[in-house]
Image: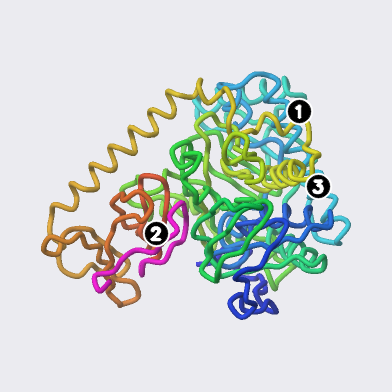
């Protein structure tokens, strides 16, 4: 199912000429932005406002990845983010993180106001129903107060259960992210910017006067390149080894009777997110959005089990809840908890990258756009230094990096051991399996009555894929690449589709 935002959104690709017909091969721009989510498009808008020529290249539809599947919260109270960051960083970095997100929130508030877009002010709440979660809430409260955020204890009286602990921060907000993205797209185009959805970037090569961006529709050149693709598709910089790829789930429900009006996020495991949203096409009806229940990509026994847990939790707390939409999202967390925003490689300021937003991609994404466009226009915000991908704290995060990559090695070995068995018949509908067909690795799945075979080896670094029974996709447990059941790339860092037995 599409997210609530994507299901109702008018296709932004309407009115955009076919990229191939536009002969983009050989064209030159001041800036090329790869990725048409909030981060990439706001970056493009800021550069276009400065009079620069800009092209945005997107492999799928506009907003198809994190932006179109977010819960749409804008908040400086972000669950337990500040206390998590403080385990690796000092007061200056915490201050810069808060200021960056404040800048992102302020920009979005101002943009929505200027464009007449709906933005709903809400109080953000972090709560816990377990003793361990309550301890985390206390740590977050302390971290927020130290950072100058006026959090306060809260009773959560409108919830159908009584938390053990909770804190709140007033003056936060929630949006329909695709409505905002539509306005940004229109503004980029009005300023002469180009958008090329449905075109995948394959590689980036340095040229004499800039960079050559190699795409499915030809090669373009640019003075600078911004990579805003969730996880960078380039292996240079080793970001794939410095990120945790995570999936989480969300659903929208129609509920009889009152529902909580503020924005809630639990500190417990699994985490639970709550907010409201108007029902598209029925503006007088307010829906309840439930999210969370996440896991590392490709590293769970059953993705469907996480979805079942979310739906069972909702039914327990809101017995009259009726499902309207269900979706999932992929996010990335860095090994030292701070996002990476800045040069792809040390000294290479003409290639900017943004990733590692840890499920807070709206405020962090706009902050990243402000930082990257600022660097390219020689006016970076002061707080942006703490986000640099090449920072000293990465040395302190070495144990986390080692653990991450030992886990990668374990899943690599485990995947190839799984290939020792032979493929077993035809899977039931919605199911998939990996094994061998003779000496060849084979992934077989059945979706809506049609059985498909692929070579279940990730085209990034050759991990053995696992079947995702919630989303009917092939997922890589190494670095989070995902492929449709027929083999097309859904999430990077992979850029090439899966091979099929006939290839």
Residue 477, image x, y percentages: 35, 46
Q: Earlier in the sequence, mark 3 or mark 1?
A: 3
Callout 3 secondary element: helix
Residue 253, image x, y percentages: 58, 61
Asked if residue 407 is positioned above or below residue 482 in the image, the reply reads above
Callout 2 secondary element: loop
Q: What separation in Å lies between label 1 and label 2 (alpha carbons)? A: 38 Å
Residue 238 forms part of the magenta stretch:
no
Q: Is residue 335 left or right of residue 434?
A: right
Q: Quadrant of residue 478?
A: top left
Q: Residue shown at 20%/59% (left/top)?
A: 441
The residue lying furthest to the front in this view is 208
Q: Residue shown at 25%/62% (left/top)?
A: 443
Residue 324 can be seen in this image: no
Q: Is residue 402 left or right of residue 133?
A: left
Q: Is residue 402 left or right of residue 338?
A: left
Q: Contact, CB < 8 Å: mark 1 with mark 2?
A: no
Q: Residue shown at 63%/33% (left/top)?
A: 388
Q: Residues within 10 Å of mark 3 (few under 14, many from 20)?
A: some
Q: Contact, CB < 8 Å: mark 3 with mark 2?
A: no
Residue 127, image x, y percentages: 60, 34
In the rendered structure, find residue 341 and report the number of the disc placed on it. none
Q: Earlier in the sequence, mark 3 or mark 2?
A: 3
Residue 143, image x, y percentages: 66, 22
Magenta segment range? 485-503
Q: What separation in Å lies between label 3 and label 2 (alpha carbons)? A: 36 Å
Q: Which residue is mark 1?
A: 149
In the rendered structure, find residue 470 and report the number of the disc placed on it. 2
Q: Residues within 10 Å of mark 2 (few under 14, many from 20)?
A: some
446 and 279: which one is in front?
446
Q: Which residue is mark 3?
A: 107
């Amino acid at each position: 199912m599409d997210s609530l935002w994507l299901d109702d959104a008018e296709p932004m690709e309407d009115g955009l000429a076919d990229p191939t017909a536009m002969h983009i091969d050989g064209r030159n721009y001041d800036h090329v932005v790869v990725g048409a989510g909030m981060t990439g498009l706001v970056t493009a808008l800021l550069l276009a406002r400065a009079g620069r020529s800009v092209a945005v290249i997107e492999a799928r539809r506009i907003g198809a990845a994190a932006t179109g599947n977010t819960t749409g919260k804008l908040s400086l109270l972000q669950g337990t983010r500040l206390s998590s960051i403080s385990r690796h960083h000092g007061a200056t970095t915490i201050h810069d993180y808060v200021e960056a997100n404040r800048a992102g929130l302020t920009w979005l508030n101002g943009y929505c106001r200027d464009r007449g877009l709906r933005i709903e002010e809400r109080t953000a709440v972090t709560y816990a129903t377990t003793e361990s979660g309550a301890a985390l809430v206390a740590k977050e409260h302390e971290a927020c107060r130290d950072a100058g955020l006026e959090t306060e204890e809260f009773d959560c009286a409108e919830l159908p259960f009584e938390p053990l602990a909770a804190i709140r921060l007033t003056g936060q907000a929630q949006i329909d992210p695709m409505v905002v993205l539509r306005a940004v797209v229109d503004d980029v185009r009005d300023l002469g910017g180009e958008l090329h959805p449905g075109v995948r970037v394959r590689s980036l090569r340095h040229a004499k006067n800039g960079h050559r961006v190699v795409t499915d529709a030809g090669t373009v050149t640019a003075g600078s390149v911004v990579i805003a693709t969730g996880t960078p598709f380039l292996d240079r910089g080793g970001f794939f080894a410095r990120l945790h790829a995570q999936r989480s789930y969300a659903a929208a429900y129609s509920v009889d009777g009152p529902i909580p009006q503020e924005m809630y996020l639990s500190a417990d495991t699994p985490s639970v997110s709550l907010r409201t949203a108007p029902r598209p096409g029925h503006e007088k009806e307010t829906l309840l959005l439930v999210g969370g229940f996440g896991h590392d990509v490709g590293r769970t026994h059953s993705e469907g089990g996480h979805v079942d847990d979310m739906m069972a939790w909702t039914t327990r707390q809101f017995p009259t809840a009726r499902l309207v939409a269900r979706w999932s999202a992929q996010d990335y967390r860095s090994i030292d908890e701070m996002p990476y925003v800045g040069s792809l490689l040390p000294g290479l300021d003409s290639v900017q990258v943004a990733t590692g937003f840890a499920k807070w991609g709206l405020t962090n994404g706009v902050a990243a756009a402000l930082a990257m466009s600022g660097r390219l226009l020689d006016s970076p915000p002061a707080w942006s230094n703490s986000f640099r991908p090449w920072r000293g704290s990465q040395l302190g995060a070495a144990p986390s990096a080692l653990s991450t990559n030992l886990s990668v090695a374990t899943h690599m070995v485990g995947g190839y051991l799984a290939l020792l068995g032979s493929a077993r018949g035809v899977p039931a509908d919605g199911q998939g399996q990996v094994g061998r067909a003779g000496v060849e690795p084979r992934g077989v799945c059945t979706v809506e009555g049609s059985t498909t075979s692929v070579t279940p080896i990730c085209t990034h670094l050759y991990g053995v894929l696992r079947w995702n029974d919630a989303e009917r996709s092939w997922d890589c447990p190494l670095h989070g690449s995902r492929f449709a059941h027929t083999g097309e790339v859904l999430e990077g860092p992979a850029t090439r589709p899966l091979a099929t037995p006939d290839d």
